[in-house]
Amino acid sequence: MSATVSDILGVLEAWAPAATAQSYDNVGLQVGRRGADVTRAVVALDMTPDVLEEAEEMGAELIVTHHPLLFKGVKQLTGGPLVPELALRLAESRIALVSAHTNLDAARGGVNFELAGRLGLKNVTFLTGMDGALRKVVVFVPEEDARRVHSAMADAGAGRIGAYEACAFQAPGSGFFRAGAGTNPAVGSSGDHLEQVAEVRLEMEVPSWLVPDVVRAMKAAHPYEEVAHDIYVLDRESRTAGLGAVGELAAPEPLEAFLDRVCTALGTEAVRYAGSDDMSIQRVAVCGGSGSSFLPAARAAGAEAYVTSDVTYHTWFDLLRGDGSLPMAMIDPGHYESERCTEDLLVERLTDAFPDVTWHVTTTRTSPVKNWIGSRYLQRT
Ligand SMILES: [Zn+2]
C-alpha cells in the first residue's frame, strides 16, 4: 500500500508544524503534487545531483531533505545553476521534494534532541522555548458540559504543558444573553427577557498552530448555537516547540574524552574547539547547524560545553571572560556533521508512520566540505 505526498506532509506537520519554522525559512512541499503516490523515497540532509540520481535509479517518487532546495528567490527554471537545475530535473523526473528544516529543529524529538541523544545526553530539554507561540483559549460553558468540551479541546492538543496533558482551569460564574427570534438556546429560553444561566469559564493553553483545530473541536462539543470564546496571546515562551537542546552525560568526563565522543558520535576525524585541558564536561548544550546565536542561552543553562556549527572567528572571542579564560568549552564539528543524524531520524519516524513505503537514507555525502588532516600531522600520531 502506498502513501500520497499529502499523507507524508500530514505526518511531518503533526510532528514539526510549519508554523514553528523561522520566518526566513521555506519548508514543506518544494516540488511536486500533493496527490502523487509514494512507494519509495530517499532521505538526505541536502538536495544534490547525487541524491537525485540515487532517487531516479531506485524509482523513488519522493525526496525528503532537511535543507530546502528552494530557499532564495528562483526566477527561472531553465537549468544551469544548481538550484533551478535540480528543481527542473525533479519536475521532469516526476519526483516530489519535501523539506523539514527549522520546523524540525524546533520539534520535540527533532534535530537537536537527536543530536543530544547521539552524544549520550540524558534529561534532554529545549535550550530555549519559542516566543510568541502560545495562546490561551477561554470558553464559557454550562458546568454539566464542561468535561466534554474539555476532553474535546485536550484531544485536539490543548493543555499540554511539559509532560502534563489536558491542563485546564475552570471557575464558576453567570452567563447572560437575550436569545433573539429564530434561536433555540440549549439552556434558558428565547424572548425579550435577559436570561441568566450558570456557566463555567474553562481555559486552556494552546500552541498558536493548533488554535484552529482546538476551536473547531471546542465548538463541536459545545451545546450552544453561538459559542462565546476568547483567544489571548500569551507573553511567555512555549516549551511545546523550542530551539537547541541541553542535557547531561551520565558522568563528568575530561574535555579530551568529550572531544573524542563528539568525533565518534558524529563520524568526523576533526572538530574545531575552544576549551582548556582541565575542563570537566557533564552538562552539554547542542544546536545542530548554525547555532552561534544561542551561545548566551547555553551559558545561562549552565552548560560546560556547547556543540554547534558555523561558529565565526569573532564568536569564539564572545566566549572569553575579561581575563581571557574560558567559562565553558565550545565545539564546532561542522554543519553537515552536526545535522547528518537528521537523515536517520527522518527515516525512522517515516518508516514508523508509513511502513509500506521504502525509505532509503542517501549513501552519498551531501556536503561538499571535507576535512584534510595534513599528512605530517598524521605521521606524528
Ligand atoms: Zn542546517
Image (cartoon, helix red, strand yellow):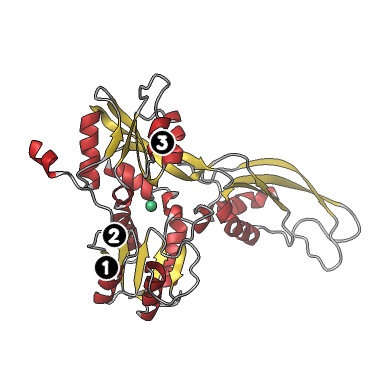
Q: Nearer the viewer, residue 17 or 329?
A: 329
Check contact, mark 3 vs mark 2: CB within 8 A.
Answer: no
Indicate which disc residue 314 carries: 3
Q: Residue 171 falls in which quadrant of the image? A: top right
Check contact, mark 1 vs mark 2: CB within 8 A.
Answer: yes
Q: Which residue is mark 1?
A: 50
Indicate which disc residue 134 carries: none
**Ligand 1 within 8 A of label 1's CB?**
no
Q: Residues within 10 Å of mark 3 (few under 14, many from 20)?
A: few
In this rendering, does residue 96 appear at all? no
Q: Secondary structure at mark 1?
A: helix
Q: Which comes sooner in the sequence, label 1 or label 2?
A: 1
Q: Nearer the viewer, residue 208 or 151?
A: 208
Nearer the camera: disc 3 or disc 1 = 3
In the picture, the quarter occupied by the N terminus is bottom left
Q: Which residue is mark 2?
A: 366
In the orientation shown, which residue stands out farthest toward the left? Answer: 379
Q: Nearer the viewer, residue 65 or 240?
A: 65
Q: Amino acid at mark 2?
A: Thr
Q: 14 above or below 198?
A: below
Q: Residues within 10 Å of mark 1 (few under 14, many from 20)?
A: some
CA gap, disc 3 to disc 2?
Answer: 28 Å
Where residue 104 appears, as percent x and y from the top left, is: 42, 53
